[in-house]
Image (cartoon, helix red, strand yellow):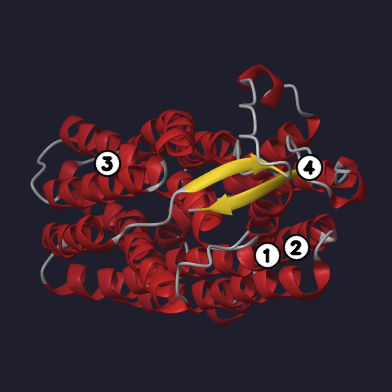
C-alpha cells in the first residue's frame, strides 16, 4: 500500500536527491572511460593494464552488492545510499592525486565499494517510496540519471581533459559529489516499510537458501550478466576505439560519444513507461528484440566505412541495449516480494559487477592479442548477446503474475 502520510512533493524531493547521487556515480564511471586514454599515456599502461584499471572498479562493486542488498533489506536504504555516495565522491577526488598503476588500481578498487551499494540501495528505496504500478518508470528515471551522467561525462571530460587534464576532472567530480553527499545526509529520509500479511501478521523472513534455489532469479542473473558484459565492455572501450581506430581527438570523442548515450537515455525512459502502461508481462519480448537489434547494429558499426555511419549504427545499438537493461531490471521490482527485493537485486547487481570486471579486461586482452584490432573484442560482445536471447526464450513469468516469495502479503509503509 502506498504511504498515505507521504505527500507527492516529499516523495519527488527524496527521489531527486537519489537522482543526483546516480549522476555523480555515472560521472566518475564514464569519465574514466575517456580519462583512461591520457592516464595510460602518462603512466605508460598497456591495453591490458588499462582494462584492469577499469575492471578493478567492478571487482569491489560486485563483491559489495550482496552485503548491501542484505543490509538494505534489514535496515532500509538510507544508510546504504549515503555511505555509497560519500565513498564514490571522496575516492573520485583522490583519483586525481595518483601517480602509478598500483595506486590508481587501489583507488578504483575502493571507489567500487560505493558504486556497488548505490544501485542495490536504490532498488530498495524505490519499493519504499513508490507503489508497484509505477516502479518501472521510476527505475527508468534512475537509469536515465546514469545515462545523463554518462552524456555529461563524455562531453565534459573531453573538454576538461583537453584544457586542464584528467586530474582536474576528478577533482571537480569529487567536489560536486561531496556536496551531494551532504544533501543526502540532511534530507534523504525515505519511509520505513513494514511487511505484513493480509490478516495483519508480520510476514516471515525468507531463508537465503530458498532465494538461491529460484530458477526465476538465476535466469534473470544470467541475462543481466551477459547484457552487462555488452554494456560495460562496449562503453569502457568505445572512446579508445574512436581514438585509435577512427583517429579522433579527445574533444571530438567526447562530443560524438554523447549522441548514442542520448539514444540510450530515450530508450530507457520510453521502455519504463511502456512496461508500466501496456507491456507489463511482456518484458522478455523487449529483451529479445533489443538483443537482436543490438547485435546487428554492433556488427554494422564495426564495419561502417565512415564515422557518420558508425555513430548512426552505434546510436541504434544503444537504443536496443538500453531497452534490454531496463526490461530486465524492471521485472524484480514488479514480481519480487518487498521482503527480499534488496537481496534479489543485490544478486543481480553482483552479476553485473562481475561482468564489469570481466568485460573491460577481456576486451583489452583481446585487443592486445590481435595487435590493436577491435574485431575479436566486438565478436566477444555479440556472443554475450546471443546468450541473452537464449535466456529470454527460456524465461517464464510467475503464474497469474503473482509475486515471487510472497503469499497473500500486503505492503504497509509507515
Mark 2–mark 3 distance (CA, rounded to whole Å): 31 Å
Secondary structure found at label 2: helix
Task: Give the side of residue 136 with respect to residue 237, left or right.
Answer: right
Closer mark to the observer between disc 2 and disc 3: 3
Mark 1–mark 4 distance (CA, rounded to whole Å): 32 Å
Asked whether the viewer can see residue 247, the reply is no
Q: In the image, what residue occupies the spot 67% across and 37% down?
A: 221
Number of numbered discs: 4
Q: Residue furthest bottom?
A: 308
Mark 4–mark 2 distance (CA, rounded to whole Å): 34 Å
Sequence-wise, which precedes: disc 3 or disc 1? 3
Sequence-wise, which precedes: disc 4 or disc 2? 2
Sequence-wise, which precedes: disc 1 or disc 4? 1
Q: Which residue is mark 2?
A: 290
Tag 2–tag 3 contact (CB < 8 Å): no
Q: Relative to 188, say whether 255 is above or below.
A: below
Q: Residues within 10 Å of mark 3 (few under 14, many from 20)?
A: many
Tag 2–tag 1 contact (CB < 8 Å): yes
Q: Which residue is mark 4?
A: 408
Q: Residues within 10 Å of mark 4 (few under 14, many from 20)?
A: few
Asked whether the viewer can see residue 336, the reply is yes
Q: Residue 261 at x, y = what percent?
A: 50, 72
Q: Residues within 10 Å of mark 2 (few under 14, many from 20)?
A: many
Mark 2–mark 1 distance (CA, rounded to whole Å): 6 Å
Secondary structure found at label 3: helix
Q: Which mark is residue 262?
A: none
Q: Residue furthest top?
A: 209
Q: Which residue is mark 3?
A: 111
Q: Residue 271 at x, y = what percent?
A: 69, 71
Q: In the image, what residue occupies the spot 65% across and 35% down?
A: 201
Q: Relative to 163, say whether 292 is above or below.
A: above
Q: Which residue is mark 1?
A: 323
Amino acid at each position: 500500500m502506498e504511504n498515505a502520510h507521504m505527500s507527492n512533493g516529499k516523495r519527488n524531493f527524496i527521489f531527486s536527491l537519489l537522482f543526483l547521487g546516480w549522476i555523480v556515480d555515472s560521472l566518475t564511471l564514464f569519465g574514466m572511460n575517456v580519462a583512461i586514454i591520457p592516464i595510460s599515456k602518462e603512466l605508460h599502461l598497456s591495453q591490458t593494464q588499462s582494462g584492469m584499471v577499469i575492471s578493478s572498479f567492478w571487482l569491489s562493486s560486485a563483491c559489495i552488492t550482496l552485503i548491501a542488498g542484505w543490509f538494505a533489506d534489514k535496515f532500509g536504504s538510507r544508510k546504504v545510499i549515503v555511505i555509497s555516495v560519500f565513498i564514490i565522491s571522496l575516492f573520485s577526488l583522490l583519483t586525481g592525486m595518483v601517480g602509478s598503476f598500483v595506486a590508481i588500481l587501489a583507488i578504483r578498487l575502493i571507489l567500487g565499494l560505493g558504486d556497488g551499494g548505490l544501485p542495490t540501495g536504490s532498488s530498495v528505496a524505490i519499493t519504499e517510496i513508490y507503489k508497484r504500478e509505477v516502479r518501472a518508470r521510476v527505475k527508468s528515471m534512475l537509469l536515465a540519471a546514469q545515462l545523463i551522467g554518462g552524456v555529461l561525462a563524455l562531453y565534459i571530460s573531453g573538454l576538461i581533459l583537453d584544457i586542464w587534464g584528467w586530474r582536474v576532472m576528478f577533482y571537480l567530480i569529487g567536489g560536486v559529489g561531496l556536496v551531494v553527499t551532504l544533501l543526502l545526509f540532511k534530507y534523504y529520509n525515505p519511509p520505513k516499510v513494514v511487511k505484513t500479511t493480509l490478516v495483519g501478521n508480520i510476514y516471515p523472513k525468507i531463508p537465503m537458501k530458498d532465494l538461491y534455489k529460484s530458477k526465476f532469479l538465476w535466469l534473470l542473473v544470467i541475462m543481466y550478466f551477459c547484457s552487462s558484459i555488452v554494456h560495460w565492455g562496449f562503453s569502457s572501450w568505445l572512446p579508445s576505439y574512436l581514438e585509435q581506430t577512427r583517429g579522433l581527438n579527445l574533444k571530438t570523442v567526447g562530443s560524438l560519444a554523447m549522441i548514442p548515450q542520448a539514444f540510450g537515455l530515450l530508450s530507457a525512459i520510453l521502455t519504463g513507461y511502456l512496461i508500466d502502461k501496456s507491456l507489463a508481462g511482456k518484458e522478455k519480448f523487449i529483451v529479445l528484440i533489443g538483443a537482436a537489434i543490438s547485435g546487428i547494429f554492433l556488427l554494422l558499426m564495426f564495419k561502417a566505412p565512415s564515422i557518420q555511419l558508425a555513430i548512426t549504427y552505434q546510436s541504434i545499438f544503444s537504443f536496443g541495449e538500453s531497452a534490454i537493461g531496463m526490461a530486465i531490471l524492471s521485472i524484480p521490482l514488479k514480481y519480487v516480494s518487498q521482503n527480499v527485493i534488496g537481496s534479489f537485486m543485490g544478486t543481480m547487481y553482483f552479476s553485473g559487477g562481475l561482468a564489469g570486471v570481466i568485460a573491460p579486461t577481456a576486451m583489452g586482452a583481446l585487443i592486445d592479442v590481435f595487435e590493436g584490432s577491435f574485431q575479436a573484442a566486438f565478436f566477444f560482445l555479440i556472443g554475450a548477446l546471443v546468450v541473452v536471447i537464449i535466456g529470454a526464450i527460456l524465461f517464464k513469468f510467475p503464474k497469474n503474475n503473482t509475486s515471487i516469495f510472497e503469499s497473500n502479503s500486503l505492503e504497509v509503509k509507515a
